[in-house]
Amino acid sequence: RKKIDAGREPMIHTMRGVGYVLKPAA
């Protein structure tokens, strides 16, 4: 799960902070 976390860090951030990253970005 360490390799996936390192390559999926941006994906998790977007999924978990989809409203937190999309709200200010929009």
Image (spheres, rainbow, N blue to C red):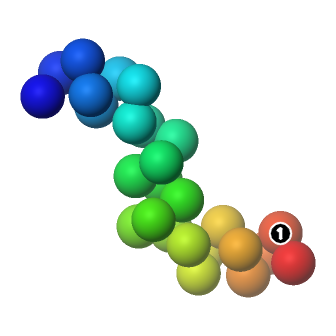
Q: Is residue 26 left or right of residue 16?
A: right
The residue furthest right is 26
The residue furthest top is 3
Q: Is residue 25 left or right of residue 21?
A: right
Among the 4 quarters of the image, the one containing residue 5: top left
Q: Is residue 15 above or below residue 9?
A: below
Q: Is residue 2 above or below residue 24?
A: above
Q: Is residue 2 left or right of residue 4?
A: left
Horizontal and vertical percent for residue 22?
71, 74
Instruction: Give the class, few, some or many, for how many residues have Cα within 10 Å of label 1's Cα (few <14, many ≥20).
Output: few
At 59% from the left edge and 81% from the top edge, which residue is drawn? 19
Please identify the quadrant where the C terminus is shown: bottom right
Q: Is residue 10 left or right of residue 12?
A: right
Q: Is residue 6 above or below residue 15?
A: above
| Viewer-closest of 6 and 20 | 6
Pointer 1 residue: 25
At 66% from the left edge and 67% from the top edge, which residue is drawn? 21
What SS does tag 1 mark? Answer: helix
At 48% from the left edge and 48% from the top edge, which residue is drawn? 11
At 52% from the left edge and 41% from the top edge, which residue is drawn? 10
Please identify the quadrant where the N terminus is shown: top left
Identified by mark 1, the residue type is Ala
Among the 4 quarters of the image, the one containing residue 23: bottom right
